[in-house]
Image (spheres, grey):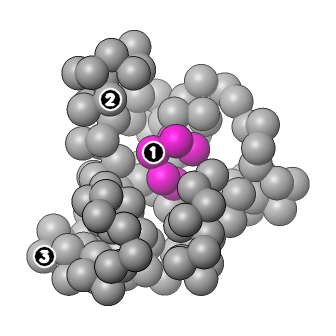
Amino acid sequence: MIMLDTHVAVALYEGRSAGLSARALRRLDREPTTISPAVLLELELLHEIKRIRLPARPIADHLRERLSIAVASESFAEVTGAALAFGFTRDPFDRLIAGHAQLNRATLLTFDTQLHRHYADALA
């Protein structure tokens, strides 16, 4: 299983795969892929501060319909429980996204070097 961080979700929405390794692209083609609801919230906040053009829902709909990337459905209590272990950052989105990936024993596709250092199964 693969989970995407926010930056990778935006890149794939925009049709960009630059920066993703051949291994990551092969795995995206073969494995179930999801995004955390934390990614949705971060997308919405990025839209509100005008860092991205569209709100979260159209991006999530596109990812689901065109790329079969669904929003994961684990409980918030489980996700936040897993996120408690990621004290390397004060960014709540990074903690929730990494915690959600860990909860699912998923590879986390991310461009974030800090997540690569602190999440054992990070890939770009």
Report if residue 55 is visible in the image.
Answer: no
Which residue shows up at 63% across the image and 52% down it? Answer: 111
- Magenta run includes residue 6: yes
Is the stretch drawn in magenta largely helix, strand or loop? helix
From the image, tell me which residue sits under label 1. Answer: 6
Q: Splitting the image into 4 quarters, where does residue 107 fall?
A: bottom right
Mark 3 and mark 2 lie on one chain; the one further toward the N terminus is: 2
Report the mark closest to the observer, 3 or 1.
1
Query: What is the spatial separation of the Cα atoms under label 3 and label 2, in whole angstroms?
Result: 24 Å
Residue type pointed to by label 2: Leu
The answer to whether 78 appears left or right of 63 in the picture is left
Marks 2 and 1 in Cβ contact (< 8 Å)? yes
Q: Position of residue 16 (x, y in %)?
A: 70, 30
Left or right, residue 113 beside residue 59: right
Amino acid carrying mark 1 in the image? Thr
Q: Reading the chain from its start, which is encountered first: label 3 or label 1?
A: 1
Whether 33 is drawn above or below 78: the answer is above
The residue lying at 59 percent from left, 24 percent from top is 14
Q: Where does the magenta region start and end?
A: 4-9
In the figure, is residue 48 to the left or right of 85? left
Residue pointed to by mark 3:
77
Q: Residue drawn 33% across and 16% down? A: 50
Q: Nearer the viewer, residue 112 or 62?
A: 112
The residue carrying mark 2 is 46
**Residue 82 drawn at (x, y percent):** 28, 82
